[in-house]
Image: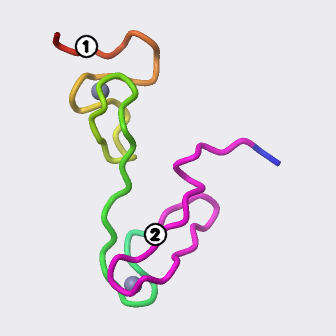
């Protein structure tokens, strides 16, 4: 067993044909291999402000949170 971020182990289901799309070695498919539908990018919710960011974002687009505590700048 090795540690894996939870967002990589989620099964991806095609919104068009409903088939499960396997993730190969943690790499997510951009298109459905069955019907070639483009898949919406998976999002992760910022723990600081709750903004949903694409998983490719290194920092939160809303508050700038980069994974380190206190790095987010939420306007209050
Ligand atoms: Zn499909
Ligand atoms: Zn944020």
Q: Is residue 45 left or right of residue 12?
A: left
Q: Which mark is residue 73?
A: 1
Q: Is residue 23 a member of the stretch shown in magenta?
A: yes
Tell me: 74 left or right of 58.
left
Q: Magenta: predominant secondary structure element?
A: loop
Say which residue label 2 marks. 29
Crowding around mark 2 (Cα neighbors within 10 Å: few <14, some 14 to 19, many 20+) is some
Q: Is residue 5 above or below residue 61?
A: below
Quadrant where the C terminus lies?
Answer: top left
Q: Residue 9 carries which label?
A: none
Q: Which residue is drawn at 30% across and 42% down?
A: 53
Nearer the observer, 27 or 5: 5
Residues in magenta? Answer: 3-28
Query: Which residue is at the far left?
Result: 76
Q: Is residue 2 left or right of residue 60?
A: right
Name which quarter of the figure residue 39 lies in: bottom left
């Amino acid at each position: 067993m090795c540690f894996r971020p939870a967002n990589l182990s989620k099964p991806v289901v095609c919104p068009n044909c409903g088939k499960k799309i396997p993730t190969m070695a943690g790499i997510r498919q951009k298109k459905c291999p069955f019907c070639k539908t483009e898949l919406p990018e998976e999002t992760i919710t910022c723990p600081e402000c709750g903004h949903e960011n694409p998983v490719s974002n290194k920092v939160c687009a809303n508050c700038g949170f980069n994974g380190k505590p206190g790095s987010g700048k939420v306007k209050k």
